[in-house]
Structures are given as structure tokens and as C-alpha cells.
Image (cartoon, grey):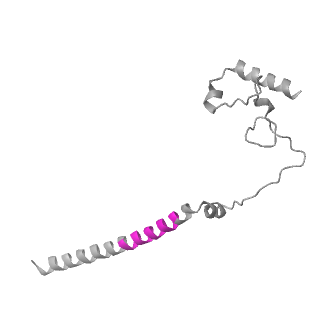
């Protein structure tokens, strides 16, 4: 090999090593950012705070009427879910989606009669 080609080989090796060091540094930066993002995702409240959102709970009003369709409330108001036998009829989402509009209107009108 000539002296010129040896210098070119050394120069090329230096450039490649420098490039690998830069890539390694960039990879370490990405790893640190990834760890920070994982930490943020594991704590949704911190993520929401960074977005500027705050948690708020609003008290119920004094004149709130009980929703008769909510069977899970223990405050009464399940009259609309009771059939003629007095048993509470429960519907799954799938059952309600299978109902026709006529059945839904019939259920609403019977509920209206019970409330009045």
C-alpha cells in the first residue's frame, strides 16, 4: 500500500469511528427519552397534569331527581324497570340493541304511565 492510501484508510476509519460515537450518543439520548415517556404513560394523572387538565368533582344539586332507569341506585326510582309482576326486568346492551323501535316506544309509554 502506498502512503496516500494508508492516510485515506486512517481518515476513513476516523470518520467511521466518529460517526459510530455520534450514533451511540444519539441512541443513549433516545433511550433516556423513551424511559421518561414510559414513566409518564405509567402515571396517567401526571400526563393529564402536563396537558393542563385538573380533576374536578361537582356536587349533586339539591333538587336532583332520581333517574328511574338506573337500577344500580339504592335510592328507589326503579319503578320504570318493574314489569306487571313487580319484578325488575334487566336488559343487557345487546338486548336493547335487538329491540325494535316499537318495543322501545312501548316501554317508554308504559314507563310514562307508571310515573304519572
Coordinates of residue 7 in the picture (x, y in percent): 19, 80
Q: Residue furthest left?
A: 1
Q: Quadrant of residue 58?
A: bottom right
Position of the N terminus by quadrant: bottom left
Is residue 94 positioned above or below 41 on the image? above
Q: Residue at x 78, y 25 (%)?
A: 108
**Which of 77/18 is in front?**
77
Closer to the camera in the image, 43 or 86: 86
**Which image quadrant is residue 100 in?**
top right
**The C terminus - image quarter:** top right
Whether the magenta-drawn stretch holds residue 28 is answered as yes
Q: Residue at x 63, y 32 (%)?
A: 93
Indicate yes or no whether the magenta region holds residue 32.
yes
Number of marks drawn: 0
How far from the left and from the top, in percent, is residue 107? 75, 23
- Residue 56, quarter of picture: bottom right
Instruction: Kindly identify the residue that appears in the image at 66 percent across and 28 percent down.
Output: 96
Q: Seen in the image, is 114 located left or right of residue 82?
A: right
For the point 76% across and 28% down, which residue is it?
Answer: 82
Q: Using the image as rendered, state which of residue 12 and residue 33 is in the foreground.
A: 33
Magenta span: 24-38
Q: Is residue 25 left or right of residue 102?
A: left
On screen, residue 54 versus residue 2, left or right, reads: right
Name the dominant secondary structure of the magenta segment. Answer: helix
Q: Give how far across and how far down residue 92 sits, in percent.
A: 63, 32
Amino acid at each position: 500500500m502506498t502512503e496516500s492510501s494508508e492516510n485515506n484508510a486512517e481518515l476513513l476509519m476516523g470518520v467511521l469511528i466518529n460517526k459510530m460515537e455520534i450514533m451511540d450518543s444519539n441512541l443513549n439520548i433516545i433511550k433516556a427519552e423513551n424511559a421518561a415517556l414510559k414513566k409518564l404513560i405509567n402515571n396517567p394523572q401526571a400526563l393529564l397534569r402536563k396537558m393542563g387538565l385538573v380533576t374536578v368533582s361537582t356536587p349533586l344539586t339539591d333538587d336532583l331527581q332520581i333517574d328511574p332507569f338506573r337500577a344500580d341506585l339504592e335510592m328507589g326510582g326503579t319503578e320504570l324497570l318493574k314489569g306487571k309482576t313487580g319484578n325488575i326486568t334487566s336488559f343487557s346492551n345487546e338486548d336493547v340493541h335487538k329491540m325494535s323501535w316499537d318495543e322501545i316506544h312501548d316501554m317508554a309509554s308504559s314507563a310514562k304511565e307508571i310515573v304519572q
